[in-house]
Amino acid sequence: MARLAWILLILVTLYLCYFHSLGAIGLVGPDEPRYAWIARDMAESGDWVTPRLYGQPWFEKPALYYWGAALSFKLFGVNEAAARFPSALAALLATLATVGSPGVSMAQKPRDGCSCFSPPPSA
């Protein structure tokens, strides 16, 4: 039961850190609105191959983000939270990959004051 409580606590913490306030503020700076605009245009035009900004091809960033944001706009509507969802999902997947990597064991007890993220002892 205690293990289930810890897993639930971790999941709630990850939700609060990554997804809770995605749409709390508007798009910030020059880049975030630009990338959201390109993704919105991609979703609206149906051209999933060439990212465009004001009708001109825009290859300043790999298309994977634009595809994710365009799909997010299709699923959740055009808003700030949908524009940020692909980045939050990527952060969550990176966190889970880090925790699931062979060198990290959340079940290890700290050794000599080291954190549980220390590499395992050499054999």
Image (spheres, rainbow, N blue to C red):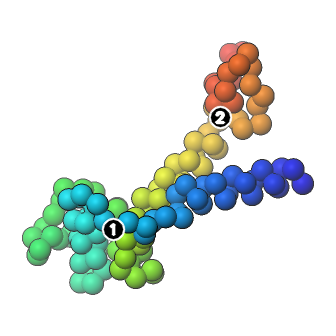
The amino acid type found where label 1 is placed reads Gly
The label number, if any, that marks residue 87 in the structure image: none
Neighbours of disc 1 within 10 Å: few (<14), some (14-19), many (20+): few
The label number, if any, that marks residue 104 in the structure image: 2
Asked if residue 32 lies left or right of residue 100, the reply is: left
- Rendering coords of residue 5 (x, y %): 81, 54
- For the point 76% across and 31% down, the residue is 108
On the rendered image, what quadrant is the N terminus found in? bottom right
- Where disc 2 sits, the SS reads loop
Instruction: Determine the image quadrant of residue 57.
Output: bottom left
Residue 27 higher or lower than 4, as above or below: below
On the rendered image, what quadrant is the C terminus found in? top right
Asked if residue 58 lies left or right of residue 65, the reply is: left
- Rendering coords of residue 34 (x, y %): 22, 65
Residue 106 higher or lower than 78, as above or below: above
- Where disc 1 sits, the SS reads loop
Asked if residue 101 lies left or right of residue 91, the reply is: right
Looking at the image, how many numbered discs can be counted on the residues? 2
- For the point 34% across and 62% down, the residue is 65
Q: Is residue 115 visible?
A: yes
The amino acid type found where label 2 is placed reads Val
Instruction: Determine the image quadrant of residue 101.
Output: top right
Spatial CA distance of label 1 from label 2 is: 36 Å
Tell which of 50 and 12 is nearer to you: 12
Q: What residue is shown with label 1?
A: 26
